[in-house]
Image (cartoon, grey):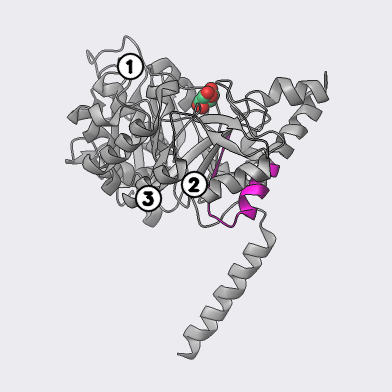
Amino acid sequence: MRISSISLAAVTVVLFLAAASCSCQAQDVARTPPMGWNSWNYFAEKVDDTGVRAAADALVASGMKDAGYVYVNIDDTWEGQRDANGVLHSNAKFPDMKALAGYVHSKGLKLGIYSSPGPRTCAGYEGSFGHEEQDAQLYASWSIDYLKYDLCSFIPEVMEKRAPNDPAAQMRLMHAAYDKMAKALKATGRPIVFSLCQYGFDAVWEWAPSVGGNLWRTTGDIAPNMYSIYANMSLQAGLGSYAGPGHWNDPDMLEVGNGDLTLAENRAHFSMWAMLAAPLLAGNDLPHMKPDIRDILTNRDVIAIDQDTLGQQGSRVYVDGEVEVWTRHLAGGALALAVLNVGDTRYSTHPFHLTLSRLGLHGPQNARDLWTGKEIELTEGMPLELTIHDVLLVRIAAPK
Ligand code: GLA
């Protein structure tokens, strides 16, 4: 009894000190990489209230909600005009944002929204420049749970105008803009995930947590093809030490189910985002997705890699020609291993040979293939057949 009350007091003191010393946005959000859906990659400017409700319904009906997807995020083009008091209103596509939030919450989901520190968003709609506190209060009054804050017009309208020919000063203006919105969100008292979107400028991973970022884009915009997916993935190599519970590198939203991606490419994309502890924000047309896409997005073994509580991002251990080998350390000493064929013309005419010793593994390893669900044995030098852009993803519960 006595021991537990002492430890309780100690925990309370530690929590109090942590809260007092940290300028972070919200310590209790994004303990694992955020999961959900975002409107942009498929719907872009066609997003509307009906479509967002349909996406929320589909998250539930498809089993994605049960698999961990929570956030329903409205991207750009919801914004209307400001009234005489500077209060922003949603446009005709979104007649009642508070009612929409109520609907999404009634499904056990959360609602996200989008803005820019500049006067205009990337699509030319109203941004938050000069109205940061007012907009943060507005989001809180609507019961918004997530904000993606996209640099866009802040570059030409503020950075370049206020600090012409001084890139370092421009970057400081950008840091301050994100800090300003982080503080405005914090002042609302509502836990709101803060997502920085400024394409990786000024090594964002080094300073985003100090301005309250829960996740930050490290790259330009993703597109539904393997070149783009691979480029964004590659840029995460070496950034692992900057990610952890509450703060994540964001190689951009998922394209699973979009464009002409093959099933192998969809699997590889999803697997690698899990290896990277990346946010899993589906970006496809949920109400009309095919069963094989739903099966990829709801693969719980792969999601468990992404959501692993240790929060340690994977790293590229070695590259052999067109085959890359990545590992990710998991809670309890387990290891995830991904072998990715990035070659455009490397067919499975001849196998790739896996070198376990280069991964610090010695002798045969019992593993679970997370796409077939089968238990397999990995051995030194074993041949692996991978078709173009396909992946082998395994979990080794007790690596030796
Ligand atoms: C930028 C972002 C995208 C999307 C669009 C919306 O390009 O990087 O993810 O939000 O703006 O206009």
Q: Which mark is residue 259?
A: 1
Residue visible at 47% across and 84% down in the picture: 4
Q: Count all numbered tags in the image, as a single digit.
A: 3
Q: Mark 3, residues whose alpha carbon is within 10 Å: few (<14), some, or many (≥20)?
A: some
Residue visible at 59% across and 57% down in the picture: 189
Picture coordinates of residue 7 (x, y %)? Answer: 52, 80
Which residue sits furthest bottom? 2
Q: Amino acid at mark 2?
A: Ile
Q: Is residue 332 above or below residue 41?
A: below
**Helix, strand, or loop for circle 1?**
loop
Answer with mark 3 or mark 1, whichever residue precedes in sequence. Answer: 3
Q: Mark 2, residues whose alpha carbon is within 10 Å: few (<14), some, or many (≥20)?
A: many
**Circle 2 is placed at which residue position?**
144
**Helix, strand, or loop for circle 2?**
loop
Span highlighted in magenta in the image: 179-196
Q: Is residue 187 left or right of residue 192?
A: right
